[in-house]
Image (spheres, rainbow, N blue to C red):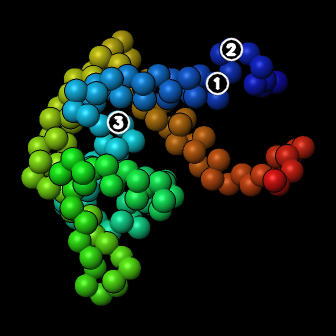
Amino acid sequence: MRTCHSDDALPRLIYQTSLRLQIHADKVLLPFGITLEQFQPLKILERGGGAVGQRQICGLAGKTPANMTRILDRLAGKNFIERRQDPEDRRAFTIVLTPVGRELVEQVMGLFTSYLDQVLTGIDEADEAVCRRVLRRISENLDRIAPKDIPGAEPG
């Protein structure tokens, strides 16, 4: 039977590893004056061709609009992004990656590639593929589970 009480329980290992990855990534980003949380929308913008709607960024980043507004305010203050009003909807904004922001993303992605090589040292491609498959399955399972389906969990 699976248990969540042991130090090597899979959910605990996933959580601890994720936390350590975030802490390490924040240290890599420190010289650039941003955090991993702030880098995420920049990466979304770069993948989206440099301009993406603010609501879409919220959805892709899994952040609330208020939280994303705070993050984007900081990025705009550092000239990494610009907000442009949507001509079809005055309440909506398109977020645009500035040349300074694009340069930052290129530099950081180069560092993260080197960092990833170090993190994955000693793990062959087959093990990495198994890990990806297992993590995707866990994520899919989490998408299907509602709090009402967990024995003893009461909606708050």
**What residue lies at 36% left-to-right and 66% top-to-bottom?**
54
- Tell me the kind of residue under disc 3: Thr
Q: Which amino acid type corresponds to the residue marked 2 in the rendered image?
A: Asp
Marks counted in the figure total 3
Mark 1–mark 3 distance (CA, rounded to whole Å): 24 Å
Q: Is residue 25 left or right of residue 97?
A: right
Residue 35: assigned label: 3
Q: Which residue is mark 2?
A: 7
Residue 75 screen position, x and y as percent:
27, 50
Q: Give the residue type that dot 1 points to.
A: Arg
Classed neighbour count for the residue bearing mark 1: other residues with Cα under 10 Å, few (<14), some (14–19), many (≥20): some
- Seen at 39% across and 42% down, the residue is 37
Residue picked out by circle 1: 12
To which quarter of the image does residue 55 belong? Answer: bottom left
Which numbered disc, 2 or 3, marks the residue that appears first in the sequence?
2
Secondary structure category for the residue under label 1: helix
Work out whether residue 125 can be spotted: no
Marks 2, 3: nearer the viewer = 3
| The residue positioned farthest toward the front in the image shown | 77
* Front-most of residues 105 and 75: 75
Q: Is residue 8 above or below residue 44?
A: above
User: For residue 111, what is the image quadrant?
Assistant: top left
**Of 65 and 42, the residue lying toward us:** 65
Local secondary structure at mark 3: loop
- Count residues near mark 2 (Cα–Cα under 10 Å), then give few for <14, some for 14-19, many for 20+: few
Q: Is residue 156 visible?
A: yes
